[in-house]
Image: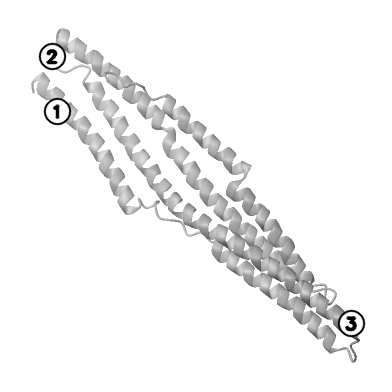
Amino acid sequence: MDPISAAVDLAKQIVAKIHKAMETAAKAAAQGGGGGAAPQFQAVSSHDTLRAAVIAAHEKDSQHLDNATKVLTTISPALRVAIAAAQFAGKVLQDKNLELLDEQRARLVEAEAVAGPAVADLRTKEQVWEAQQAALREVAQLTAKLQSIPGWEGMASSGYGGAATGQITAVTQLVAGSLRMPSSIREVANLNEAIMSNISRAIGRQQRQITKVNPGVPGSFACTHAATTALTGLTLRLDAELGGETTQAKLDEVQGLVDASRSMIPDPWPGS
């Protein structure tokens, strides 16, 4: 094969490698890439169980007060007023609990709606970058062959070889700059999944805490008060997980990795 044909053939192979990587990426995006399926989070379903526990807690308090009043042979007007006041206070507290539950559930529904597709998209992008990395490594190897075409000598050959060397260096830097991209993307996806898992576990703990409380003194609505404390704590936890400083710090760390990768990529590209 003559030198020019050899160069053209290698150039075609390089283009084919890049196109193959693009096809692999497109296929991964179309099929979800195995790891690109949207995760099934449990935060909302866990919260529905928590709601049931909160309702049961108030019903337990109310039944406890009813049972206590039934055993009384006589109920004075003052005691009747006290019982009514206790029932009213318990209802006001429970209404507040139900309001908190509605607010929390709305946040969780939104979080799952955002995080699910985001994680699926990130998993696909991670696979795309891995496929592109593999292609870039092969491109660097093929480009190296262009430094010296068998049977081609002289000034033109030397100049062509020098240009090829510049491209090899640039491709090598591009590979190095892209090495952290899959892991950086994976970190963000893992962060989203960890946040939703942490929330589900926190909801489960609060639900178990509520169910363990005993009614106590009739009319005290101890179980309902315990639910209020648990729900208030859960709201604080949601604030921390869905928009807290820890999350931002992690995202800043990932952005730092991406910026470091970009700085390794030649700009402008040699010969451009």
Q: Earlier in the sequence, mark 1 or mark 3?
A: 1
Between 136 and 272, the one lying in front of the other is 272
Q: Is 229 situated above or below 158?
A: below
Query: What type is the residue that disc 1 sits on?
Result: Asp
Q: Position of residue 179 (x, y in %)?
A: 41, 32
How far apart in space, not on screen, are marks 2 and 3 (Cα)? 109 Å
Task: Please identify the residue farthest to the top as the structure is shown.
Answer: 155
Which residue lies at the image location 31% right of the left edge and 22% below the top edge?
Answer: 269
Label 1: which residue?
9
Q: Position of residue 131 (x, y in %)?
A: 33, 40
- Quadrant location of residue 71? bottom right
Q: Which mark is residue 251?
A: none
Which residue lies at the image location 62% right of the left edge and 53% below the top edge?
Answer: 238
Label 2: which residue?
152
Q: Position of residue 248 (x, y in %)?
A: 58, 40
Q: Is 163 situated above or below 194?
A: above
Q: Earlier in the sequence, mark 2 or mark 3?
A: 3
Q: The C terminus lies in which quarter of the figure?
A: top left
Query: What type is the residue that disc 3 sits on?
Result: Leu
As helix, strand or loop, the secondary structure at mark 1 comes to helix
Which marked residue is nearer to the observer: mark 2 or mark 3? Answer: 3
How far apart in space, not on screen, are marks 1 and 3 (Cα)? 99 Å
As helix, strand or loop, the secondary structure at mark 2 comes to loop
Q: Is residue 76 left or right of residue 65?
A: right
Label 3: which residue?
79
How far apart in space, not on screen, are marks 1 and 2 (Cα)? 15 Å
Query: What type is the residue that disc 2 sits on?
Result: Trp
- Quadrant location of residue 133? top left
**Labels in figure, total:** 3
Dot 2 and dot 3 residues touching (CB under 8 Å): no
